[in-house]
Amino acid sequence: MKQMIFAAAIAALAAGAVAEEAPDIVLGGFSVGDVKLMCRQRHGWKVDFRREADASGVEYAVVEMTREGGEEFPAPFNLSFNFAKLDTVAAWRPWSESSGFTMYWDPANLPGAGRTDFRKWLPLYACYSSGGRNRTTFAASETAEPLTIRSGIREEDNRLYFAFHFYDARVAKRRHLVAKLRIDPRDMFWADAVREAADWMTAVSGRRPARVPDAAFAPLYSTWYSFHQDVHQDVIERECALASKMGMGTIIVDDGWQTDDTNRGYAFCGDWRESKNRFPDLKAHVAKVHAMGMKYMLWYSVAWIGDKSAAYERFKGKYLYHNNHLKAYCIDPRFPEVREYLISTYERALREWDIDGLKLDFIDSISVQGRDPAIAEGYRGRDMKSVTEATERLIADTYRRLSAIKPDVLIEFRQAYIGPSIRTAANMLRVSDCPADMQRNRRGIVNLRLTSGGTAVHADPLEWHPSDTPEAAAKNVLNVMFSTVQYSMKFAGLDKRHVDMIAHWSRFGAAHIDALQRGRFKPYHPELAYPLIEGESDAERIFGVYAEEMSVKTGALDRPVYILNATDSDSLVVEIPAKAKVAAFDTYGAEKGTRTYEAGCHRMPVPPSGYLFLEGVRPVHVF
């Protein structure tokens, strides 16, 4: 291991000076050049910095800290480096809709590129070429505690500069830690590099993802966009009777079931008893929905205890902060009685009403805002000092106790809380709110698919204007076909053509679930919002086309190929390597013509929001 200490620090030590700050350490030998460790104030921590590499060519910058005596807060440090921007056109981050690089104008201030912790996103950053090849993908092992990524490009030297800042906020005390920065320079498809990095973060975290039952992949009906808080059991039963016929397997009853208030906000959250005006017999109501063949989930706002709830007085003094706009207090999970209250509330719902799962919301709101109130109180009554540690405990215990009641319990969380800590409880991860925005929905789905392993990825609930054409409405569906589709339309009174379209695509999704949701997954051109997506199982290959004139190369016709046309065009450009029989279908699944094509590139007719089905034609040998 080669270590170089800055000349100025060496000279000062040689002269007998006592340095107040520890010298930086620089390691060479990385594909990104030298990597510098800066840990100026070590506070009694012994720091070891080394380079490791595995047989595949992936490198690791490893920081190991040990401390004699009692536990202490980790010493903040950062790892920085820079390298020439070679054949690199864009960057991918799980939290960003932009693929560009920030300009590094001020040499003393490297721009912020993202901040992560267990409640939001993952410390993952990928650089790739115009051909979709990985150039360098970075991932940090610390997925629970706060971590800041800084990055920018300098016009003076056309180099990319990075710094990963570990423990730059107060975290749980410890005596020993190992933190790693994974650097992957391998020439491979960009999404494979991202997926492998995400899988590595889950593995190194030591956290075990929750079990994912088959029901987590079934199309779902959400009441949020269709009814918001104005939900009633008789209306829901009518909607479920229609939804079940269209292939939906679960309903999530969102905010409103627990209150008569419709003023938004969360002033009435925290007691979690049903509104008797809206749900006069919740248990019987759930039983009716079960009889229709659907599972039943309820929404809970984990973070908030409302100003007007009975629970407010019970937990007074056990909050992290107050949100004036939402009219609610954020609970402090470091109090064991707070965690017990929440988990026992969820247990009661499963037992008393026989529901099948929960949508747990606002995990990302559980944080310290400003000064931690626990400090002035000497952490009195709290069994943990770290909010992160306590929230992780709350999440893990929730799943452990609920799955003991119902092994197939369904739990939905949403972006941006997506990492290994969250997946210990979540078996459904949903795209963050993007009502009626099909491109953001598609982008969110892809990002979740790449970072969520085998956890079911759900679209944000779909809505469209009921007077739109079925073909235009279907584009909302086709944009999220590589996920579990959620709907939030009022089905009663919906045009029959829309109903038939939804039913067809629900059947299609169920018939091809392995290729669409569980199989090999290749999204192309993130810088263009993924205009082409490919899913593959051992039995078939499916493409989704989301931009006109985007050509499709089918690859070997060793299995059936489907190409979904999520555009307004009445044809698609398709390149096939061998003779093929091609059938075109409309958005209801009705066949519209069949034709045989020779090997080559062809413009193939297909209805807008319809699809093509291709089968290779084997030559007939005459003996």
Image: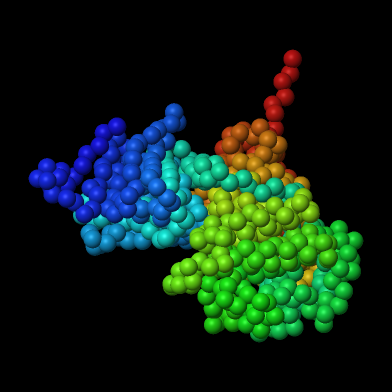
Looking at this view, name the residue that lies furthest to the top.
623
> Is residue 56 visible to the viewer in this orientation of the structure?
yes
Q: Is residue 290 above or below residue 282?
A: above
Residue 468 or residue 113, whichever sits in front: 113
Quarter residue 226 falls in = bottom right
Q: Is residue 6 left or right of residue 550?
A: left
Residue 15 in the image: x percent, y percent?
A: 9, 45
Residue 69 in the image: x percent, y percent?
A: 40, 47
Residue 391 or residue 526, whichever sits in front: 391
Looking at this view, name the residue that lies furthest to the front.
69
Residue beneath the point at 78% across and 64% down = 348
Looking at this view, name the residue that lies furthest to the left.
15
Quarter residue 495 falls in = bottom right
Quadrant containing the C terminus is: top right
> Is residue 495 visible to the viewer in this orientation of the structure?
no
Residue beneath the point at 74% across and 52% down = 403
Q: Is residue 481 left or right of residue 133?
A: right
Quadrant containing the N terminus is: top left
Residue beneath the point at 54% across and 60% down = 384
Residue 585 in the image: x percent, y percent?
A: 73, 52
Residue beneath the point at 38% across and 34% down = 52
Residue 73 in the image: x percent, y percent?
A: 41, 55
Residue 164 or residue 155, whichever sits in front: 164
Q: Is residue 240 left or right of residue 44?
A: right
